[in-house]
Image (spheres, rainbow, N blue to C red):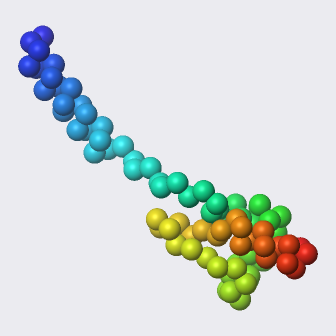
Amino acid sequence: MPDDFKAELAELITQALDKNLPKQEPELEGFVKLGRAANYADISRTTLDNWLKASYIKQYQIGGNQLISKKELNDFIKQHSI
C-alpha cells in the first residue's frame, strides 16, 4: 500500500473513533450518586429521598447526574448519630 493511502486511512479511523467514543465524565471525587449514597450511609433510598426533600442534605446536579457530597453526608450522620 502506498504511504499516502496508509496515512489517509489512519486519519479516517482516528476521526471515526473520536466521534463514536463516549465522552468521559469529569472527575467527581468526593461525590456519590443517590443510590450509592444510600448504600454508603447504610440507609434506605426512601430515607435518603426524604432527607433531600426536607433539605437536610444538599443535592447537586453535575453533568446530568444527581449527586451528594460524601463530606456533607458524613457530617449529617455524625451530627445526628445515625
Instruction: Pinpoint residue 32: horizontal percent, then vertical percent.
Output: 64, 62
Residue 78 visible from this viewpoint:
yes
Reply above or below: 65 against 76.
Answer: above
Instruction: Pinpoint residue 54: horizontal percent, then vertical percent.
Output: 71, 89
Name the residue at the right extreme: 81
Looking at the image, residue 24 sits to the left or right of residue 40; the answer is left
Quadrant of res 53: bottom right
Quadrant of res 76: bottom right
Numbered circles on residues, count: 0
Instruction: Pinpoint residue 21: horizontal percent, then vertical percent.
Output: 36, 43
* Residue in view at x 46 percent, y 65 percent: 63
Looking at the image, residue 27 sits to the left or right of residue 69; the answer is left
Quadrant of res 5: top left
Instruction: Pinpoint residue 36: horizontal percent, then vertical percent.
Output: 70, 60
* Residue in view at x 71 percent, y 72 percent: 72
Between 36 and 28, the one lying in front of the other is: 28
Reply above or below: 1 against 15.
Answer: above
* Residue in view at x 75 percent, y 66 percent: 38
- Quarter placement of the N terminus: top left
Name the residue at the top extreme: 1
Between 44 and 51, the one lying in front of the other is: 51
* Residue in view at x 15 percent, y 19 percent: 6
Between 69 and 65, the one lying in front of the other is: 69
